[in-house]
């Protein structure tokens, strides 16, 4: 099994050996071993079409030449620091598979906290008309539409590439008929809607990375994921939150809507104070699985 693809794999390579080879290569790039193991498992599952338990049961089986070649190509892409999700063309969020690729932000597990908080609200207020600002791949809104069959939603997404993936994912998950996707700046679009539409709940995972922090992000992030979806307005990354707090209450479609937003590490106090001073009521912080404040909820503008 010599010269298979751009990366020479060990002769008669088993699934177990392939996993170890993949992990070692990623660790050599500076990727943490736990993350490297997770990526190796995802790559093997993707290539072999086997579930995790099947790979374990067949750990000593010899990898086919075709599978070894595909894994070698994936590893070569990772050596160029292309995100694994882009290489595979898919990722998982809230237990669902989503198509992703260049031009769309890769959904993170931390953002599932926003979905949990939104689900809490929807269960207590059903029926709900939902608005998402910055849909990206559609992971958030589609996860909620799958969870709540009675839910209808509108989403704004200014990036054509991201909107493309959102449409694909909505169709694949069978929720396209309940999702209106608008490719326009959300403030301009909401102003046009006027009183023809009223939303009960606004969701957003906006760009919030401060300019000074952007350059310190991993190469997979800063060199490949869309800057438009990462870096927030102003040097502190708080531009979107300022616009939400100031403008959403003045628009007819969102005047009385509740709000749920994600924010970055270390931004909890600043984001909460901003909305508090602007007159938003019943503010509550939610922590992600790592115990870090990640999401702010509000019952809406009170003044």
Image (cartoon, grey):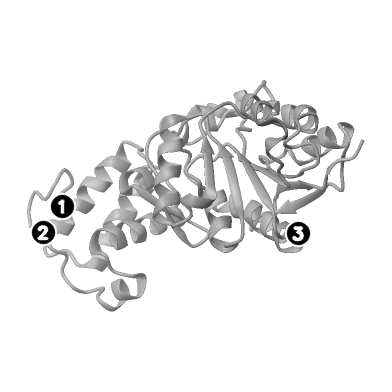
Q: In terms of sequence position, does the residue under pointer 2 or pointer 3 come before the other? A: 2
In the drawing, does residue 71 fall left or right of residue 146?
left
- With respect to residue 14, does 185 lie above or below? above
Q: Which mark is residue 296?
A: none
How many angstroms separate mark 3 from mark 1 (CA)? 52 Å
Place of residue 148 in the rendered image (x, y in percent of width and height, measured from the top left): 60, 62
Where does label 1 land, which residue?
69
Q: Position of residue 27 (x, y in %)?
A: 38, 49
The disc at residue 65 is 2
How packed mark 1 is, by other alpha carbons closer than 10 Å (few <14, some 14-19, many 20 or more), is many
154 to 215, vertically: above or below: below
Left or right, residue 271 beside residue 138:
right
Q: Is residue 280 above or below residue 173?
A: above
Element at label 3: helix
Give the residue number, with chain letter if any, for mark 3: 125
Measured Cα–Cα span from mark 1 to mark 2: 6 Å
Q: Quadrant of the C terminus?
A: top right
**Disc with the residue nearer the chain's start (3 vs 1):** 1
Instruction: Using a 10 Å C-alpha cutoff, classify the residue at mark 2 as few (fewer than 14 neighbours), some (14 to 19) or many (20 or more).
Output: some
Residue 273 at least partly seen: yes
The residue depicted at 58 percent of the width and 26 percent of the height is 185
Is any part of residue 9 visible from this angle? no
> SS for tag 2?
helix
Query: Closer to us: mark 2 or mark 3?
Result: 3
């Amino acid at each position: 099994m010599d010269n298979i693809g751009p990366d020479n794999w060990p002769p008669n390579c088993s699934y177990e050996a392939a996993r170890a080879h993949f992990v070692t290569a990623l660790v050599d790039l500076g990727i943490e071993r736990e993350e490297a193991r997770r990526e190796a498992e995802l790559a093997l599952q993707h290539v072999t079409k086997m579930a995790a338990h099947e790979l374990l049961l067949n750990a000593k089986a010899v990898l086919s030449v075709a599978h070894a070649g595909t894994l070698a190509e994936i590893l070569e892409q990772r050596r160029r620091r292309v995100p694994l999700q882009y290489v595979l063309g898919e990722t998982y969020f809230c237990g669902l598979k989503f198509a992703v690729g260049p031009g769309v932000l890769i959904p993170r597990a931390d953002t599932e906290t926003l979905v949990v908080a939104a689900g809490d609200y929807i269960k207590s207020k059903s029926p709900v008309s939902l608005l998402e600002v910055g849909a990206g791949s559609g992971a958030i809104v589609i996860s909620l539409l799958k969870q709540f069959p009675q839910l209808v939603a509108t989403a704004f997404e200014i990036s054509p590439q991201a909107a493309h993936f959102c449409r694909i994912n909505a169709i694949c998950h069978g929720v396209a008929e309940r999702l209106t996707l608008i490719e326009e700046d959300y403030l301009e679009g909401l102003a046009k809607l006027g009183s023809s539409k009223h939303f009960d709940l606004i969701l957003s995972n906006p760009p919030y990375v401060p300019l000074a922090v952007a350059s310190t992000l991993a190469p997979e992030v800063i060199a490949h994921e869309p800057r438009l979806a990462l870096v927030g307005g102003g040097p502190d990354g708080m531009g979107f939150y300022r616009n939400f707090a100031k403008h959403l209450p003045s628009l007819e479609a969102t005047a009385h809507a509740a709000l749920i937003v994600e924010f970055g590490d270390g931004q909890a106090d600043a984001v909460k104070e901003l909305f508090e001073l602007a007159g938003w009521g019943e503010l509550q912080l939610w922590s992600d699985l790592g115990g870090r404040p990640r999401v702010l909820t509000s019952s809406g503008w009170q003044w």
